[in-house]
Image: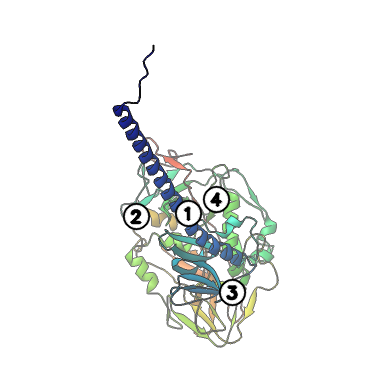
């Protein structure tokens, strides 16, 4: 007869202990799961409050031609020309549309600001959900400059440029990205692609340049003999190269208010078409007054800031209001520092080196000027430089030498893609900056006066290129020279 064994006390104790341990483990897992679910739900709720605001605000900035009307001093309220107003109410931590529609709640902070960024009218919103992370979003208003709608909704959120790896020491005359150190003025083996491009003479006619077709009567071509040198590191940390000389083979004739309206675009467009490298994604542009000023030392900055129009005694950066002679180029009313029909000036607007038009909206119509109804207020942005000693105003002599290249053609000058205004006693002159043919000379050519008189001028243009983050530089072996340049690599 087989023996039958019962459950012993020891095995029962072990069984109970195992059940307790397993139950404890399951309880811990469930507690963690529930905690994670709560955290996920909490994050989702926070995201939902931002998403609700974002839906309304994207819809707002997409309204064609919409502009900011006012922003409160506390920056917690913004109104638009559409008639809509968005207000952050700190008392109940909510954002309201037109005071009566609550679109988001549990908001700890929300501020609004409005600036021109990369030529776009941008509303910056800083928003923080309670116990959430603070966000900064830059919304692009639709078509306030060119009246064009964007195809992709992502274009309504501005993407700031990444910072480049380069830094500079102009006193020492060096630039570095941490891997290689170059000297200001070093030669770099940059070649435009395609290597030969034509800028058709039809786009240099009177309706574009304001000058008779009889002068700008030839196509502009890429100059294959131009070499490239290190100029500077721009404000975003990218390396900028400058052509060894202006385009001495062609002279650009300019005239009338069309130059003030279209000149910045035109100079950039010519340089882009002739000297870009499409294979490397490098876009050429024209030299600007900011490029020149980047090399100023303290004496140079002081000479600019101390400039005074001797006729009206208006200092650089000051404003002057005219009650007669009230004509202006049509673009001027969109510029920072302009005041049309008022005694005050705009704090926001396009900068002096920003184009207002694109290729599709370039002003070739007959309406190039307008007249203020009462006052015309202008900011003195024009200045001249004629240093006693050539490089007195620059940190680095090589930088000075590249900017003020001796053209060898008496009276020639190089146009800069930068506008400026000179405030005389009785009228304002609307100008384009230039680098003159004399050592260290900077000035401006007047193409329209507020009394209506047009002006003309002729000069060269100077392309520059900025290397993107996808481009690196390999230092040459031996001494750098025009025949032994540094190499560009991807």
User: Label 4, label 1: how many angstroms apart (C-alpha)?
Assistant: 47 Å
The residue that mark 4 highlights is: 283
Residue 35 horizontal side relative to residue 69, left or right:
left
Give residue 170's mark.
Answer: 2
Name which residue lies at 63% across and 59% down: 150
User: Label 4, label 2: how many angstroms apart (C-alpha)?
Assistant: 25 Å
The residue that mark 3 highlights is: 84
User: Label 3, label 1: how many angstroms apart (C-alpha)?
Assistant: 32 Å
- Of callouts 3 and 4, which one flags the residue occurring earlier in the amino acid sequence? 3
Image x and y of residue 293, in percent: 41, 62
Contact? badges 4 and 1 (CB < 8 Å): no
Regarding mark 1 in the picture, which secondary structure is present there? helix
Q: 283 or 485: nearer the eye?
A: 283
Q: Nearer the viewer, mark 3 or mark 1?
A: 1
The residue that mark 1 highlights is: 41
Q: 106 or 324: nearer the eye?
A: 106
User: Label 3, label 4: how many angstroms apart (C-alpha)?
Assistant: 39 Å
Regarding mark 2 in the picture, which secondary structure is present there? loop
């Amino acid at each position: 007869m087989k023996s039958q064994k019962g459950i012993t006390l020891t095995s029962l104790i072990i069984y109970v202990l195992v059940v307790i341990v397993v139950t404890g483990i399951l309880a811990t897992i469930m507690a963690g799961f529930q905690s994670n679910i709560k955290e996920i739900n909490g994050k989702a709720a926070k995201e939902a409050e931002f998403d609700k605001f974002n839906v309304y605000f994207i819809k707002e900035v997409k309204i064609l031609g919409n502009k900011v009307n006012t922003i409160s001093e506390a920056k917690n309220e913004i109104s638009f020309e559409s008639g809509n107003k968005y207000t952050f109410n700190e008392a109940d931590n909510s954002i309201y549309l037109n005071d009566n529609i609550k679109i988001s709640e549990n908001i700890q902070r929300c501020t609004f600001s409005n600036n021109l960024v990369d030529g776009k009218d941008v509303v910056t919103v800083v928003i923080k959900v309670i116990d959430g992370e603070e966000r900064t979003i830059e919304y692009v208003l639709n078509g306030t400059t060119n009246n064009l709608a964007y195809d992709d909704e992502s274009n309504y959120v501005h993407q700031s440029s990444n910072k480049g790896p380069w830094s500079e020491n102009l006193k020492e005359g060096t630039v570095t990205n941490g891997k290689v150190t170059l000297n200001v003025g070093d030669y770099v083996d940059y070649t435009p692609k395609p290597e030969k491009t034509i800028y058709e003479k039809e786009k240099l006619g009177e309706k574009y340049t304001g000058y008779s077709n009889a002068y700008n009567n030839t196509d502009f071509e890429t100059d294959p003999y131009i070499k490239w040198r290190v100029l500077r590191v721009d404000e975003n940390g990218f390396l900028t190269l400058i052509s060894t000389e202006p385009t001495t083979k062609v002279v650009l004739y300019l005239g009338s208010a069309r130059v003030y309206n279209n000149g910045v675009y035109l100079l950039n467009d010519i340089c882009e078409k002739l000297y870009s490298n499409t294979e490397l994604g490098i876009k050429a542009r024209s030299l600007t007054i900011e490029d020149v000023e980047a090399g100023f030392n303290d004496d140079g900055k002081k000479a600019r800031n101390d400039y005074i129009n001797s006729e009206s005694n208006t200092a650089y950066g000051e404003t002057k209001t005219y009650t007669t002679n009230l004509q202006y180029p049509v673009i001027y009313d969109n510029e920072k520092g302009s005041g049309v029909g008022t005694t005050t000036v705009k704090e926001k607007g396009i900068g002096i080196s920003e184009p207002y038009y694109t290729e599709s909206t370039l002003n070739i119509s007959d309406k190039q000027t307008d007249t203020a109804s009462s006052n015309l207020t202008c900011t003195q942005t024009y200045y001249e430089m004629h240093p006693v000693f050539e490089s007195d105003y620059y940190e680095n002599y090589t930088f000075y030498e590249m900017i003020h290249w001796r053209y060898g053609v008496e009276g020639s000058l190089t146009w800069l893609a930068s506008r400026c205004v000179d405030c005389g006693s009785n009228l304002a002159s609307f100008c384009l900056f230039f680098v003159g043919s004399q050592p260290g000379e900077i000035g401006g050519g007047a193409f329209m006066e507020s009394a209506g008189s047009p002006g003309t001028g002729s000069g060269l243009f100077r392309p520059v290129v900025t290397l993107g983050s996808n481009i690196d530089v390999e230092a040459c072996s031996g001494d750098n020279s025009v025949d032994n340049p540094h190499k560009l690599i991807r």
